[in-house]
């Protein structure tokens, strides 16, 4: 009897999810493609960083640098144009989560911190979309650290500039810590459509999700720490982008080993995002 009820409940849930997908507006479909695009970018970044760690002519690159690498492949401009659309969709989904709160984060301090982080991520991926468009038209890909240092210098010149940068740094660190928390508790699994995944897919998503979120958290925490140092010292040269964060790992004891672990983690994070692109619950 209990087995029949469980099967009936699972069947009803599956039908409900199928209905949502069929009725989902275009923005949800774009969000799925956005997760795919983001995953592809992180896989490229991770592979290039692994190549660097092993001395295989790779490089510590930015998200923009990864896009530039994709552009140099056969049919690169076509792939890049598709990724640009996906990245725009991902950014737009972050804005929707900020404004309409579909994940029910709430209006308390914790909820607003989460929603502010969505807005910052939206700005990052809108910027990345613009970078992809520029690369298509043969513009060069700049270091993210150089770009962020320029933005930091402009922010420091404004009233309360140091405070704004410190707050952004705190948000980055918060995102990093939250990724650690999601990896440790495996909370990320709640967002996946378990009933649509076979056992192998579920186990793979679990393991690469844990590893990938931890690596992603490390990178965000490093970027946040350097943003706070920028605010304290009022020195834009302290600002680090993704490539700068990876470079800091190399400077630590056993640096190449640390870089290899985090780089493989970024590849895992990108692969996990491919699972999210297909199986994540995205309710508008």
Image (cartoon, rainbow, N blue to C red):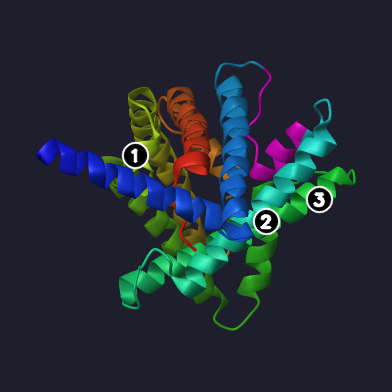
Q: Which residue is mark 3?
A: 133
Query: Picture coordinates of residue 144 (x, y %)?
Result: 66, 49
Query: Crowding at label 2, few (<14), some or many (≥20) Cα neighbours within 10 Å?
Result: many
The secondary structure type at the circle numbered 1 is helix
Query: Picture coordinates of residue 257 (x, y %)?
Result: 44, 23
Establish if 134 lies above or below 94.
above
Give the residue at x 46% y 56%: 224
Q: Which residues are magenta?
A: 57-70
The secondary structure type at the circle numbered 2 is helix
Q: Is 25 in the magenta?
A: no
Say left or right for 1 vs 184. left
Rendered image: mark on residue 273: none
Query: Picture coordinates of residue 75 (x, y %)?
Result: 84, 30
Say left or right for 235 vs 116. right
Q: Which residue is mark 2?
A: 88
Say left or right for 268 vs 55. left
Query: Crowding at label 3, few (<14), some or many (≥20) Cα neighbours within 10 Å?
Result: some
Circles 1 and 2 in contact, beta carbons < 8 Å = no
The answer to which image quadrant residue 94 occupies is bottom right
Counting residues from the start of the chain, the first of labels 3 and 2 encountered is 2
Q: Which residue occupies the foreground of this view, 61 or 126? A: 126
Rendered image: mark on residue 194: 1
């Amino acid at each position: 009897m209990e087995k029949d009820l469980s099967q009936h409940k699972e069947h009803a849930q599956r039908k409900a999810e199928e209905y949502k997908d069929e009725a989902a507006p275009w923005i949800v479909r774009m969000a799925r493609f956005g997760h795919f695009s983001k995953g592809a970018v992180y896989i490229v970044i991770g592979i290039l960083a692994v190549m660097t760690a092993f001395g295989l002519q790779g490089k510590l690159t930015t998200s923009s640098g990864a896009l530039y690498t994709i552009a140099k492949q056969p049919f690169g401009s076509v792939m890049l144009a598709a990724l640009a659309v996906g990245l725009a969709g991902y950014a737009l989904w972050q804005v929707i989560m900020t404004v309409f709160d579909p994940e029910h984060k709430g209006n308390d301090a914790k909820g607003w911190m989460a929603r502010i982080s969505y807005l910052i991520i939206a700005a990052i991926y809108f910027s990345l979309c613009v970078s992809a468009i520029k690369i298509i038209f043969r513009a060069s890909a700049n270091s993210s650290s150089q770009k962020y240092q320029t933005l930091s210098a402009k922010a420091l010149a404004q009233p309360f500039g140091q405070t704004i940068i410190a707050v952004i740094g705190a948000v980055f660190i918060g995102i990093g810590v939250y990724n650690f928390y999601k990896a440790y508790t495996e909370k990320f699994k709640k967002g996946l459509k378990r009933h649509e995944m076979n056992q192998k897919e579920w186990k793979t998503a679990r393991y690469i999700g844990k590893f990938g979120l931890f690596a992603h958290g490390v990178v965000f925490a490093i970027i946040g720490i350097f943003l706070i140092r920028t605010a304290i010292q009022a020195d834009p040269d302290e600002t680090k982008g993704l490539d700068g964060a990876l470079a800091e790992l190399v400077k630590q004891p056993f640096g190449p080993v640390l870089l290899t672990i985090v780089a493989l983690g970024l590849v895992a994070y990108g692969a996990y995002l491919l699972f999210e692109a297909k199986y994540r619950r995205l309710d508008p």
